[in-house]
Amino acid sequence: MVSQVKYILYARKSSESEDRQVQSIESQIQELQLIAKKTGIKIIDILQESKSAKAPGRPIFNSMIERINNGEASGIICWKLDRLTRNPVDGGAISWMLQGNILQNIKTIDRDYYPGDNVLLMSVEMGMANQYLRDLSTNVKRGLKTKAQAGWMPGEAKAGYMNEKGVEKGTSKILKDPIRYPIIQKMFDLMLTGIYTAPQIIEKLNNEWGYKTPIKKKNGGKPMSRSAIYRILADPFYYGRYEYPAGSGNWYQGKHDPIITEADFWLIQEMLGKKGQPRPQKHYFPFTGMIRCGECGAMITASKKTKNNKTNNKIRTYTYYHCTKRKTDYPHHCSQQAIDVKDLETQIEDMLLKISIPEDFKNWAVKYIDEVNDNEIETRDGIRQSQQQTYNSIEKQLDNLTQMRIKDQIDDQEYNSQREKLKIERETLNKNLGFTEERADNWRELMKKTFDFSCYAHYWFKDGDLETKKAILSTIGWNPTLNDKKLNISLQKPFEIISNNFSPSQLENFRLELAKIPENKERTDDFASVRPIMRTGRDSNPRPLP
């Protein structure tokens, strides 16, 4: 009799598409326990497994079969027969155990299976479950192949991209991730400069740009790992090609927006020192990854060309900068032409000459800054004392407020309201106590660095190596663009002030006059007209220099 049979309750659900409509494991156990209670059967153990049954090798299932063969139980209660098996090997084991009376009963939510039943019917039912799984797998693979052929890589989107949401399954596109796409693009741009190594780039990506993986993904919300950056840099997906399935040799042209060109991708592979490919020299091109095309907005890259002069049979190498022409949202073909590196560097030198100042003027300006700072120390001390007195007053008000609440002179609402206001005011003052002095010191240091840079930058650039030239260009301003072979850049505020207010002839006159005037107060007074211009740099809160 069934009531004398000892049962093992087995519940299974996998995360694959075959089981998406199946009750959760918890729900299966609850329902099966209710059935056991109503029918009076004895459950000696409850086993649960989160694993697909499409292939043999489930550990929990195998241990259950072993326990039944050892006589611990002779019955199984499960949700449906397909929870036990979806492959011929496991199905054959279950059928054989029933025929041999090792299993006395298999109980599901809608029927029972006994040793005396027609084995053919149960075999058909198990076969249907196995065939359903095979058909489902075939249909899924067919759908994924169709999607791949249509230009959309199946599966989870790569770093910098996201899967389209809210569309019919199998039709989602791969879109730009608005947060991470620009960061990954910048990562490739830095690699193409030839100046940065992958470890240096990942340091910037994680610590300066704040990159984090999407929270909803497995192990999400974390910085990018070192192994991940190498995988990304070596993945053809980022120039528009992908292989599906992996290792099949079937390559497709994607419809997603690529981050780099195919030529740039293979250049990076050389930089990474891929087997059979030479590693290019470090510090290849100084200005790549910095300048954008003034017409289409794409990045400016650099190339080298070697020409053989037939007249003297000498080989000459030319370096030139040009638009990558890979801005996918630009509606027209970019018409910008290449510019020789010598012409580009000449334009940068001209910019540096416009913000250049003589050394005598620089020394005088630094001396004037120190003089102004000394005169303002007394004023800053007064401000600081006033701030400290106000801070002490707030501390006293908070103490009084607490005493008033203890004596029930005010209620909780009034106490909390006034206390919160005083705490905010105290916090603001606490920050400002050191801000006045710090701001003055920062301004003084910034102006000294500015005058040093303006005095020597032209020489540094002319005689410097490629890395120095790149650093100088990034220092003088931001948003450099190249349009019709002309470099445009927004100058940092201090350099803009120098460029707009001092002509080279004026600065030379200042230098000559300074050489004539003795080192005394009169020398400073003779250049009082310059002070308002210098103070403009302070009052306008210039952008800090790197």
Image (tube, rainbow, N blue to C red):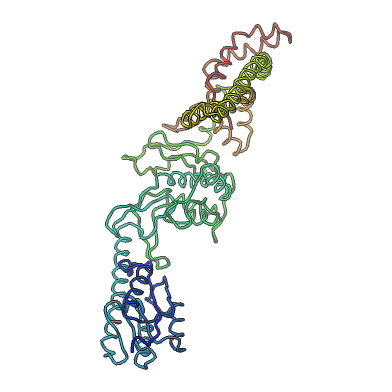
User: Image quadrant for the C terminus?
Assistant: top right
User: Foreground residue, 467 or 170?
Assistant: 170
- Closer to the camera in the image, 114 or 523: 114
How far across and down, in percent of the image, does residue 395 sit? 60, 26
Q: In which quarter of the image is residue 429?
A: top right
Image vertical order of residue 270 relative to residue 357, above or below: below
| Residue 456 % position (x, y) | 64, 26
**Is 64 displayed left or right of 203 in the figure?**
left
Q: In this view, does 465 lie to the left or right of 18?
A: right
Counting from the top left corner in percent of width and height, residue 96 is at 36, 90
- Residue 185: give x, y in percent of width and height: 45, 46
Q: Quadrant of residue 371?
A: top right
Q: Quadrant of the N terminus?
A: bottom left
Please name whichever residue, 308 or 448, is drawn nearer the observer in this view of the structure: 448
Q: Eyeballing the image, is 24 above or below 420?
A: below
The residue under the point 37% across, 86% down is: 94
Name above or below for residue 53 compared with residue 477: below
Taking the spot 32% from the left edge, 91% from the top edge, the residue there is 115
